[in-house]
Image (cartoon, coloured by chain):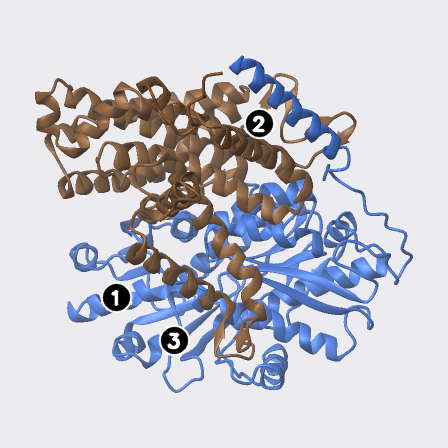
Amino acid sequence: MAAKPHRNLVRSYAQDLRLFGSPTKRAGLAATLIVLLLLPTVVQDDFWLSVLIYSGITAIGAIGLNLLTGYSGQISLGHAFFIGAGAYCAARVGGDLGLPLPLWLLASAAVGAVLGGLIGPFALRLRGHYLAIVTLGLIFVGEHLWRNLTSLTGGNNGTSVLAQPRIGPLDLGALEIAGENYSRNQGWFWLVWALVALVALLAKNLARTRPGRALCAVRDHDQAAEVIGVRAGRYKIGAFMVSSAIASMAGALFGAYQQHVSPDDWTLLLSIQYIAIIIVGGLGTIFGSILGAVFVGALPALIDEYSSVIPGVATDAGGEGFISVFALNQAIFGLLIVLFLVFEPRGLAGIWFRVRAYFKAWPFSY
Amino acid sequence: MKTNKSIRLAAAALGLMLAVSACGGAGQDDDAGGGKEGAPGNTAGFDGKTIKLGVLTPLSGPVAVIGKPLTSGNEVWFEALNAKGGIGGKYKVELVEEDSQYKTDVTVQKYNKVKSDVVAFAQVLGTPSTLAVLPQLRTDKILAAPASLDAFWVREENLLPVGGPYQVQAINAVDYYLTDGGGSKDDVICTMIQDDVYGEAGQQGIDFAAEKYGFSVANTQKFKQGTENYAGQIGALAGAKCQMVFLVATPSDAAKIWGTAAQARYAPQWFGQSPSYTGALAQSAIAPYMQQSVLIVAEGTEWGDESVPGMKQMVSDQGKYAAEEKPDYYFAFGYNQARAMTAVLEKAVENGDLSRDGVLKAATEIGTVSFDGLTGDYKYGPAEERNPPRASTIFKVDPAKPFGLAKVKYLLESDAAKEFEFKKADL
């Protein structure tokens, strides 16, 4: 019997491109899926579910930004604008017209793509800091629009987003399977994380095929990319469209979950938070976007839960102690981000890749 | 073969999920009331001894300067109440405080965190945060007291506001200016407002007053919170020769605005909506300008005013339970808020029902709650019949006073303010 090649031996390009090529990766995928399916039934706590739902929504938006910034090297501070546009679209299409989930989600994506397509051409002429400033302008133009287009956005008061998570007879807001009732947060957890998986798969597919390689070429040197036959302009605009379509979907989910949004939700701070997420998670990796979103979303909640046991920490306003739980929370969080950037510039995903490489070569790891 | 494998995998996962999920639903579970009059049965947030109330407030970040004293006001009221025995003389009240950071998503998360452990929310601070949790308050049937003077809350049955809304303050300010303030309706009256929902509320009040008193607003300057330079707006107001300017801002912006006006030697009669002011302004370099040109329209009376029984009681409670707390407008607000919530809880205990429905029902039955002069009396009842106080107090800046404010006209209740109608907002 001929010896089978070792599972780590890659003999063709197609093999190299496989998403879940090795048995360990497939097992990891299965384990992740099972965890995602079972988690809400084990952790029924509304607080942790809502933290994870917001993290999931953020992960979707971060994947979008990572495609644009991490893969194609276009810095954008305007991400919050597209997220806001998606939320308002969901309010009108999903709430007022009462269309089902797939339709309002796709409508938001379409609106995002169109807006991204309008902004994209600026990236043809501008690079680096200049592009950052132009997209920064987008935030302020957006804020003006959100505050004044009252029929669309409700003005300063904001608007209710009554888009329902309903697909045909299935209402994820009040799920009933085999006689068992599930809470709104449980239903939303499954919805959001299924969408995270879907968007991640689509983004990964984009990144590992020709468009993805073209984007990387544009990122590394756009003129060189043109020389080897990549139409840099087309891909830059395309990257903007895909990225903002995904951002708008995240916005639609944010709005529909929170049920009320106002212009104060889409400030520059939100854009910066997204940039922090993809840097902490790992630029140019899909997995890193998800890790970063969970890290930034869930870590403050974790610190919040456990910092009250530290001595000298005041747990209520005006209580005893030299620092309040809340101030400590922010300080620890800030410190962690700084430490990450100093010691692991490739982000959380970088750590993960190192761990994986170690075990791949085990027991001959050095 | 590959597809086969993944299908098997998916099927296995689904099977496993169904097996576990048979006990994994977290849908609504009804609380059985089972209480009798004066002795309510156990329910979410009530274990037969202690009533737990939630507080969602910014305890970190830029708005913590408001959240902390306000929460301290909540605490002091309930500590004083507990010392007397508590609700109905026997049930102690405990606050469950969560930091909302003044962010809507964090507020919603924290709301989810504590909602199943509390009877009601004693405080949700800020208009955006309140709007963000309102849809869930409705579905969960929970009562919450918003720490914000917006007019939206008046007609919402899930909310328990206190104090006269911003519109009322603005109308009373105009009334004062036109009567005791020595102005006339032929003066050039202008506004300078923050470009958000808080600014709009003040503007709405001024517009209503303009119609009632027969003047027109000559000039309106809008600004974004946190603007660095106000020379443009001040120049425009001076250019329009405004004699009275109604300002809707928060303290850090108000300080810059008045500083800019002082430098430009432009001194109209300013009226500041209550959140424009904070005690620190009276100790700052612009205090002389403010003493000369600024009046603040707020509620209640000056800090430590012995002639008002509510203030006397509050200062004594504060000395007993939070001696290190500085005199603060927001402290009084939190104190009042807690008093309104106490009225609801007393009623609910009397009815023997502290369940969520019971608390909401109690909120419609409490009638008028008096705040002993700390703010105008509020007529509660079913949301559509509520009548918020129409009185405001005009203060002048006086650095010698504890909070830097001395009353000029106490509880002014203009006819125009009484006529203002609060409509249910389409939120």
Question: Which residue is nearer to you in this view: B305 or B8?
Answer: B8
Q: Chain of mark 1?
A: B
Please give the letter of the chain rendered in blue: B
**Numbered disc in front, either 2 or 1:** 2
Residue A165's disc is: 2
- Identified at 60% across, 83% down, the residue is B312
Circle 1 packing at 10 Å, graded few (<14), some (14-19), many (20+), is some
- Identified at 50% across, 50% down, the residue is A298
Vertical relation: B149 (above or below) A162: below
Q: Is residue B422 visible?
A: no
Question: Which residue is nearer to you in this view: A334 or B405?
Answer: A334
- Left or right position of A274 against B418: left
Vertical relation: B415 (above or below) A310: above
Q: Amino acid at mark 1?
A: Lys
- State how far apart marks 2 and 1 are (Cα): 46 Å
- State how far apart marks 3 and 2 are (Cα): 53 Å
Q: Quadrant of residue A15?
A: top left
Residue A165 in picture, x, y percent from top left? 57, 27
- Identified at 25% across, 62% down, the residue is B243
Residue marked by disc 1: B256
**Numbered disc in front, either 3 or 2:** 2
Instruction: Tell me whether marks 3 and 2 sit on the same chain.
Output: no
SS category of the residue bearing label 1 = helix
**Numbered disc in front, either 1 or 3:** 1
Residue B355 in picture, x, y percent from top left? 79, 51
Q: Chain of mark 2?
A: A
Please give the letter of the chain rendered in brown: A
Residue marked by disc 3: B396
